């Protein structure tokens, strides 16, 4: 448990590098952070260091302080936290569910948000049971409004033409990579089925 959690926490700083430097989220948490930065008028990327140096230094300092805080906090409380393993689910699940309901309701004080939370909770449970990863869904949910905004701006510049998406080398490269990554799992599944049939 210690090794897995240490590795999980170690990925946070590394995944933050492409977000701050290039504006590309390296994880689901970074995709949520990207949405938060855009909401506050900050555009992650190379110009972020020039246009908003105070915010960048604040993020770096916050991560540095958080690492020291987590070290001393975990050393002091690791014995108590380890006992959570033996806590019965009948106690933990109602507490977690209550926190989810309060958190979703407190944003806009609307019962509708609680219903949406339950709906997506059931949807996520079904995806987990079918072993479908949730990360692409969360990343797409966060990045879709940003992509739509920039696509509309690009279409206004090109007069409504989609041709620049395939005429420019950089955009064509990213489209090709997206297409390959979309088909690659299907190809691997097809090859595995073919090999399974051949082995019979």
Image: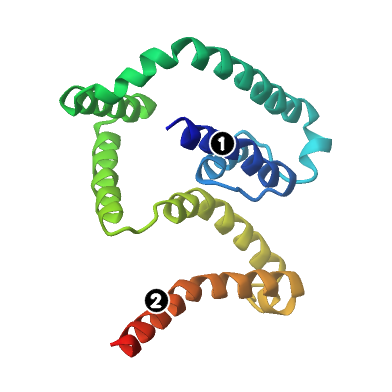
**Residue 89 appears left or right of 167:** left
The tag earlier along the polypeptide, 2 or 1, is 1
Residue 176, numbered circle: none
Say how many tags the image has: 2
Task: Using a 10 Å C-alpha cutoff, classify the residue at mark 1 as few (fewer than 14 neighbours), some (14 to 19) or many (20 or more).
Answer: few
Image position of 79 with respect to 171: above or below: above
Residue 36, numbered circle: 1
Badge 2 is on which residue?
189
- Dot 2 falls on a residue whose secondary structure is helix
Front one among 156 and 127: 127
How far across and down, in percent of the image, does residue 91 sit?
19, 22
Q: CB atoms at circles 2 and 1 under 8 Å apart?
A: no
Q: For the point 39% across and 79% down, which residue is it?
A: 192
**Residue 115 appears left or right of 166:** left
How far, Cα to Cα, is label 2 from label 1? 36 Å
Q: For the point 30% across and 52% down, which residue is it?
A: 128
**Residue 7 appears left or right of 63:** left
């Amino acid at each position: 448990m210690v090794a897995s959690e240490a590795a999980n926490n170690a990925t946070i700083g590394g995944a933050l590098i492409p977000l701050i430097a290039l504006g590309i989220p390296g994880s689901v948490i970074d995709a949520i952070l990207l949405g938060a930065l855009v909401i506050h008028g900050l555009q992650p990327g190379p110009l972020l260091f020039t246009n908003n140096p105070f915010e960048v230094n604040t993020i770096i300092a916050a991560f540095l302080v958080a690492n020291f805080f987590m070290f001393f906090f975990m050393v002091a409380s690791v014995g108590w936290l380890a006992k959570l393993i033996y806590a019965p689910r009948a106690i933990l699940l109602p507490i977690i569910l209550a926190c989810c309901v309060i958190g979703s309701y407190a944003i806009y004080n609307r019962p509708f948000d609680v219903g949406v939370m339950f709906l997506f909770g059931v949807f996520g449970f079904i995806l987990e049971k079918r072993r479908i990863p949730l990360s692409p869904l969360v990343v797409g949910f966060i990045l879709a409004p940003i992509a739509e905004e920039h696509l509309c701006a690009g279409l206004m510049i090109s007069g409504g033409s989609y041709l620049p998406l395939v005429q420019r080398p950089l955009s064509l490269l990213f489209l090709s990579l997206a297409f390959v990554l979309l088909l690659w799992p299907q190809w691997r599944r097809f090859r595995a089925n073919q090999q399974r049939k051949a082995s019979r």
